[in-house]
Image (spheres, rainbow, N blue to C red):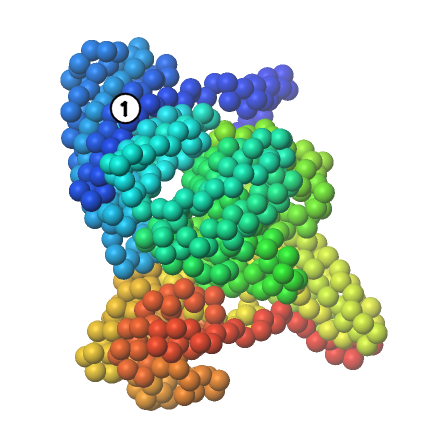
Amino acid sequence: MDVAPRPAWRRALACLIAWLCLSMAPLWAAEPVSLDMQLRLLPGERRLEGSALLKLPASADRRLVIRRSARLASLTVDGQAMRLKRWWRGDLEIRAIPDGARTVEVSWQLDLASTPENTTHRETLGSNGPTAGPAGSFLPAGSYWYPSLQVGQDDQMQRWRVTIEVPTGQRAIVPGRLVEDDADVSRVRTIYRMDVPATGIDLMAGPYVVAERAIESVDGRSLKLRTLFHPRIADLSSDYLDALGRYFKRYEEWIGPYPYDDFSIVSSPTPTGFGMPSLTYLGVDVLRLPFIRDTSLGHEVLHNWWGNGVYPAYGRGNWSEGLTTFMADYTYALDASPDKARDMRVGWLRDLSAIPAGEALALRRFTSRRHGVSAAIGYGKSAMLFVMLRDRIGQAAFDRAIRRFWRQHRFQVADWSQLRAAFEAEAGQALDRFFAQWLDARDLPELRLQAVGDTPKLSQGTGRFDLDVPVRLSSATGNTQRAIHLAGRDVAIPVTPDTTRLTLDPEFRVLRRLGAAEAAPVLREINLAGRASLLLLGDADFATAGATLADRLLDRPARRLPDTAAPGNAPLLVIGPAAAIDAWLLRHAQAPRPANLAERGDVQAWAARLPNGKPMMVVSGASAAAIEAATRPLPHLGPYGWVVIEAGRTVDKGQAESHPQGLALSPRAAQAR
C-alpha cells in the first residue's frame, strides 16, 4: 500500500525533529549505573563472595538482574532492607526496583564451575558460565555473576570501582584503570576504576607474572601497558609489549587518542580470544604462536576503538567486527603485499559463495559470531563492504570519516546509519543505496561475462544491485581496465577492435558470488553450505576417532551415513583409512586423492566439490591414532585446500590459485567491431 505524501511543512518539521533526536541522543540516553564492588575470589574453592553498592539512574521499569545460582545474603534499597518482587528467566533471577529508588546494596555468594580442560575454541565461545580454578578463573559479564541493572529489557551502561582480593600467588583483573595494587603474605588486593560508560564487567584471575611498560599517548597522557602471563610464557612479555607500542602508535594516528589509560594482555588456560575495554584475554597456547603478535593482537587492540570505545547497537546490527577486520587483519595483509590482500578478499568471497542462495543472513542482522556462516557474513562480508567503500570515496575521505565517527560517538552506542552519515559527510555524496544493498540483501550478485552475438555483455541475473565492476581488457599491446556501471540485468561492454579477452573483477574487489571455476574449494566450506552428512570408513577404532574429529570440525551434528552410501545432495565429510578412502572415491566416480598428498604424513585432508557443487571434505589417516591426533590442528586449518599432518603436527598445507572469470573474444567478433 502506498503512503500519501505529507505537506512540505510537515516533512520539514519531521526532518527537524529527527535531527534533534539524533543530535541530542547522548543527552537523552539513560545515565549509566555506578557500581562500587568488593570481591573475594577463592579459585581453589571455586567460590566468589561479593558486595556491591549500585547508584541508580532515574528512570522507570528498572530491574536488578543476577545469576540465579547466586545466594543473596542481604538486599537493601535506599538503606532499608526490602523484599523485592522477583521472577526468573532461564539462568537469571530478576527483581523489580521501586520507582524513585536511588541506591541498592547487595551482598552475595556464588559457587563457580571448574575451569574446563582440553576444551576447544568453539566450545569456549559457546559457554557463558563463570568458572574458577588455580590455573585460571573467568567470570564473563554475560553470565551475570554480579548484580546488574536493566532498564526495560536492556542492560544499562555502567561505571565502576571494583576491589578484588585473591589468595597470594594469584592476580585478578577487570577492565579499567589500575588504581591500587598491594599484597601481603596471605592475599593480593587490587582496585580498578572505569570512569566512562562501559557495557559490563568481565573478571579474570590466574597465577600471573606481571610486566609493565609506559608509553605516551598522542594527546600527552601516560599509558600503562601490561602483560599478565602464566609463568610458562612470561618470557614472551617483552616482545608483546613491543608489539603493543606499535599498534597504539598506528591506531592513535589513524583514528584518535586511545580511550582508556591502561591496556593489558591476559593469558587464559583455555583457548579464548576475547576483547574487553582496556584488555584482551587470549589462550596460553594462542599466545605461544609467533604470528599472533602480528595479527590477532592488533585486532584485539583495535576493538578498544570499535566495539569497546564506540558500542554497536546490536539490535540494529554489529558493524564493529567488520570494520575491525578491515582496519586490522586486512591492513596487515596489505602491509605484507598486494597478493596477500588479494588472497584475503578471495577467501571472504569464497566463504560467502559457499553459503547456498537464500540461506545467508542479512549483514544488518549480524550480531556476533556463532558459527561459520555468521563469521563469513559479520567479518568477511562486512570487511569487504569497507574495501569497496574506500575504493568508491578514496583513502583521504575514508580516513577523515573514520576520525569523524570516532569524535562524534566515543563511549556511545552507534548503528550503521550513524556510521554511514560520517562517510557521507566526508565524501560529499549520498551513500544510502550503497549501504542498503549490502546491509539488507541476503544474497550476492552473480556476475557473468557473456557474448551476445558480437557484443560482450556483463550481466547479474536478477538485476537488483547497483555496481561499478572492474573489467580488464586485454589485447596484443597490453591490458587496460574499465569500471562498468551495472544497474540492471545486463549492460554492453565497450571494447576496441584489438581486444581479445575480458577478465571480470581481476583483483576480486566486488562483493559477488564466485563461479565454481573462480576459486578452488577450501576445508571450511563444509560448515557453510548447510548441515553436512558424515561417512566413516574403516573399523570400529577408525569410526570412533572419526566421530570425535567430525564433532570438532563441524558447527552442528552431521547426518551419519552407512559406510556403503554414495554421495548425496548434502555437504559431505568422509573420514577413514587411506585404502578405504581411495576405493570409495573410485567406486563413486569422485576425483582421486590429489597427487601432491600421496604417501605424505600420517593424515591428509583435502577439499573437493560434489557434482551438485556442494563441498566435500576428505580426511585420510594411516591409523585411528593418527586421526585422533589430528583433532587438535585440523579444525584451525579451514582456509586451506589441503593439509598434511604428521604425529598431530601440520607439516604442509596449501591452496590452489584463484582465477577470475574471463571471456575470450573471437577474431571475427573483433573484426566486426
In percent of width and height, residue 534 lies at: 29, 72
Q: Which residue occupies 42% across, 78% down?
A: 644
Q: Left or right? Give the position of 273 relative to 13.
A: left
Picture mark count: 1
Q: Is residue 51 above or below residue 667?
A: above
- Residue 503 visible in the picture: yes
In percent of width and height, residue 98 lies at: 25, 14
In percent of width and height, residue 202 lies at: 35, 38
Check the picture and name the quadrant holding the C terminus.
bottom right
Which residue carries the number 1 mark? 52
Of residues 625 and 286, the one nearer the viewer is 286
Of residues 221 and 421, the one nearer the viewer is 221
Q: Quadrant of residue 435?
A: top right
Q: Is residue 473 above or below residue 348?
A: below
Q: Which residue occupies 50% across, 18% down?
A: 27
SS of the residue under disc 1? strand
- Residue 298 visible in the picture: no
Q: Which residue occupies 53% across, 33% down?
A: 259
At label 1, the amino acid type is Ala
In percent of width and height, residue 487 lies at: 65, 52
Q: Is residue 646 above or below residue 555?
A: below
Q: Left or right? Give the position of 81 relative to 287.
A: left
Q: Quadrant of residue 360?
A: bottom left
Residue lying furthest front = 185
Q: Left or right? Give the position of 550 relative to 18.
A: left
